Amino acid sequence: MESGQERCYGTEEQVWWRNTLDDECLPFVNLKPSLKEYTQEQLKKKDAVIQFNFSDDDVFRTLKEKPSPVFNIGKLVYNTKDDKWYKVLDLKTDDNSNPTWVSLTKRNGTKTIEISKHEEFDQFQSSLNILLNINFASEENAIVEVSPKIYEKLEIALENPLEGVATTLSSCKLFFNGKEVDKEDCIANIDNIFEGSTIYASEGVGKPFKFSRFPEFHSTYPWSNSGRYSDGLAFIPSQNIRLCGFSTCAAKDESQYEMKYQVTVDGTEVEKEIIVASGWEDEYYYRHRLNGIYPVMAGQKFEIIVWIAKSLASNTEVATCRGARGEEYDKVENEHMGLFKLEYASSSDNGTSIDCGHFPEIFYFLG
């Protein structure tokens, strides 16, 4: 605007543009910016009007700057080159608040590193690309890729992605590595989350139901486990469920043990992991929440197979408690009597069977 006259912009020749966010593409390469101002009086002239051609061929597109990582003292950033979290110890910036030198240490580490080159700064980011696996109450699933800022509350970061697939965060619970995630928390506070990790959002779930199968449990005459052989059992529900966890027997004289487990549904592996089991509940149980929640249709078979040892690498033995009189499982008091039929698993060469051994509990949602 100048002296009350409106000004417009036209192009005198074709403008070339390219996406400068592409890899190996430098800003302003092969660009021919050619904008010229015209007053309304000048636009009335024929030759000026002819110069206007509102098409994609001569649109000058604004060049966007690549998002820069946010370095703040005492805060975390994520390194995409080595997939590690780093804490900012100190930094220096220029007049535009851009970092020129940063001192960092790995998360929970002590060794300090310093960076000062542009290409080193580009390895860090203050957001994380993760997958959101949404399990709907209708038993359908959707996977959405999201990029929340690492200190942004999940209730804000995930609101639009969930609404985009016709659900809401308020109707879902979030889980990562078998543990429920607080919606008011942020990515930076979630242990062992990395680029490409999956957070599970389960719609319409509350406290899971528990199926118990043993009328008796013993710590005398314990179960011997070395990791060389597997313990397994198969379950067939009479109505649709969503499997979310299981328990194994607690160690008799140890505070923890290592466990590799495998879960299959209708012959398809859905989860496999190695964990350290600890925190015995009710003296006899270790209760494990699965990373995901898996639908099992009525009549389908799911199997749980475990390898347990004090040390799986050295096959060090550990003695655990054991369940007994398991053949009477259909008489054990449960909230949904008769829901499960038990069968021998495809692999259980350490002794667990319908009668005795591991898997005293299964955790699930109906529907």
Image (cartoon, rainbow, N blue to C red):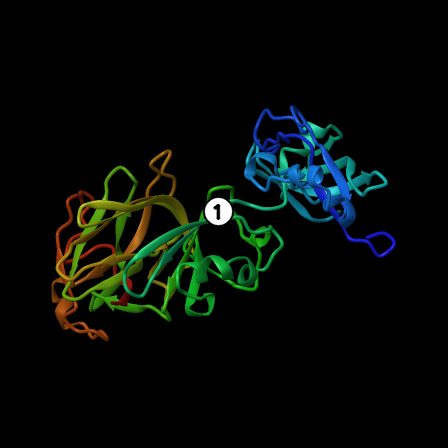
Q: Secondary structure at mark 1?
A: strand
Camera-side residue: 130 or 254?
A: 130
Q: Is residue 96 above or below residue 283?
A: above
Q: Residues within 10 Å of mark 1 (few under 14, many from 20)?
A: some
The image quarter in which residue 361 lies: bottom left
Q: Is residue 174 visible?
A: yes
Q: Is residue 140 left or right of residue 7?
A: left
Q: Is residue 264 above or below residue 205?
A: above
Q: Quick one: which residue is furthest to the front in this view?
A: 46
Q: Residue at x 78, y 40 (%)?
A: 98
Q: Is residue 321 above or below residue 97?
A: below
Q: Is residue 258 left or right of residue 181?
A: left
Q: Residue at x 17, y 66 (%)?
A: 239
- Of the 4 image quadrants, the one containing the C terminus is bottom left
Q: Position of residue 51 (x, y in %)?
A: 66, 37
Q: Is residue 324 left or right of residue 162?
A: left
Q: Position of residue 87 (x, y in %)?
A: 68, 43
Q: Position of residue 196 (x, y in %)?
A: 47, 42
Q: What residue would you read off at disc 1?
A: 130
Amino acid tagged 1: Ile
Q: Is residue 71 visible?
A: no
Q: Residue at x 75, y 38 (%)?
A: 36
Q: Is residue 110 left or right of residue 145?
A: right
Q: Residue at x 40, y 65 (%)?
A: 167
Q: Position of residue 248 (x, y in %)?
A: 30, 55
The image quarter in which residue 46 lies: top right
The image quarter in which residue 240 lies: bottom left
